[in-house]
Amino acid sequence: MDFHIARYGNVYGPRQPIYGEVGVVAIFTQKVINGEPLTVFGGGDQLRDYLFIDDAVEATVRLLNLPGSDTFNVASGEPTSVNQVVQAFEAAEKRSLEIIPQPQRPNELGKFFADISKLYAALMWMPETGILRGVEATLDFYRGIK
């Protein structure tokens, strides 16, 4: 039997729950929509790999049609800091947002992003949605501007 294991980065976008501790893009989306300040821990230089849902779906469908069996990192392959996510929200909103700095949380990883070269070699495909466009689409969805 052919199968592939997909290890996803931080997938975000429309229809993701935005209530509770569900990821920084979702948390910031809720805060921006409610007009609340954004909380940034430890200076905001933590690096993560944010993948827009449309790209996650596209890669998954392509993997379903790929013969053989293997394991792939399905992510953007681009390290993005929390500060860059804040900047994307500010650009989408066309205004500065209020930030509440907080101390670094204990045991939080400073860097977590994926090497997607194996995925690219197998599929000849790269994610298409950058963090700004993904944040804009997420905000639009939750504001009802589909």
Image (cartoon, rainbow, N blue to C red):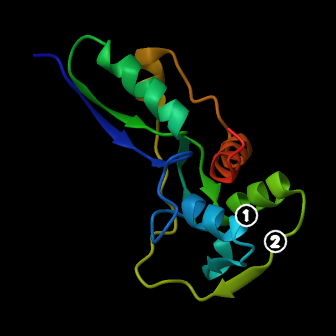
Labels 2 and 1 touching (C-beta < 8 A) = yes
Q: Position of residue 66 (x, y in %)?
A: 31, 13
Q: Would you place residue 104 above or below residue 108 in this image?
A: below
Instruction: Name the residue tied to disc 1.
Output: 86
Q: Position of residue 119 (x, y in %)?
A: 42, 26
Q: Residue at x 65, y 77 (%)?
A: 40
User: Camera-side residue: 39 or 44?
Assistant: 39
Q: In the visual, does 49 lie left or right of 97? A: left
Q: In the visual, does 91 lie left or right of 144? A: right
Disc 2 vs disc 1: which is toward the camera? 2
Amino acid type assigned to the residue bearing label 2 in the image: Leu
Number of marks in the rendered image: 2
Which type of secondary structure does the marked residue at label 2 adopt?
loop
User: Camera-side residue: 109 or 50?
Assistant: 50
Distance of mark 2 from mark 1, alpha carbons? 8 Å
Q: Specify the quadrant of the image occupied by residue 4.
A: top left
Q: Would you place residue 122 above or below residue 57 in this image?
A: above
The crowding category of the residue bearing disc 1, from other C-alpha atoms within 10 Å (few below 14, some 14 to 19, many at least 20), is: many
Quadrant location, the C terminus: top right
Q: Earlier in the sequence, mark 2 or mark 1?
A: 1
Q: Position of residue 81 (x, y in %)?
A: 64, 60
Q: Residue at x 63, y 52 (%)?
A: 142
Q: Position of residue 34 (x, y in %)?
A: 69, 71
Q: In the visual, does 83 lie left or right of 125? A: right
Residue 109 badge: none
Q: Residue at x 66, y 43 (%)?
A: 134
The crowding category of the residue bearing disc 2, from other C-alpha atoms within 10 Å (few below 14, some 14 to 19, many at least 20), is: some
Instruction: Name the residue tied to disc 2.
Output: 97
